[in-house]
Amino acid sequence: MKTLSKNEDKAITLLAASNGEMKRNLLERKSGLAKSSLASCLNMLERKNIVEVDKTSVVHFVRFTEWFKEL
């Protein structure tokens, strides 16, 4: 967790408070991050295998990966 950026830490904290899953637009509102900043943050968290973004429907969901939940 010490290697996370400020924005990544904010996103992880909000996800943890909502049982590890949240709509992307709600995460954007609650974090106060711009869409582009949140997109960059989520891309980095996906690369680190911490979150996955479900883009199969119109509403995107962000959730912790199974690997991260097991830590």
Image: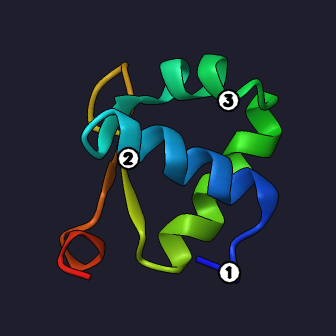
Other residues around mark 1 within 10 Å, as few (<14) / some (14–19) / many (≥20)? few
Specify whether residue 54 is in view: no
Residue 13 appears left or right of 39 = left
Could you tell me how many numbered marks the image carries? 3
> What is the x, y in percent for residue 36?
80, 39
Residue 32 appears left or right of 50 = right
Residue behind mark 2: 16
Specify whether residue 22 is in view: yes
The answer to whether residue 8 is above or below residue 14 is below
Quadrant where the image shows the C terminus: bottom left
Q: Residue at x 54, y 77 (%)?
A: 47
Residue behind mark 3: 31
Other residues around mark 2 within 10 Å, as few (<14) / some (14–19) / many (≥20)? some
> What is the x, y in percent for residue 58?
36, 19
Q: Quadrant of residue 64?
A: bottom left
Q: Residue at x 32, y 33 (%)?
A: 18
Measure how far apart labels 1 and 2 are at the Cα level.
Answer: 16 Å
> Cβ–Cβ below 8 Å for labels 1 and 2?
no
Secondary structure beneath label 1:
loop
Q: Amino acid at mark 1?
A: Lys
Measure how far apart labels 2 and 3 are at the Cα level.
Answer: 13 Å
Residue behind mark 1: 2
Secondary structure beneath label 2:
helix
The answer to whether residue 63 is above or below residue 24 is below
Nearer-N-terminus badge (2/3): 2
Viewer-side residue, 61 vs 33? 33
Q: Amino acid at mark 3?
A: Ser
Q: Amino acid at mark 2?
A: Ala
Q: Quadrant of residue 65?
A: bottom left
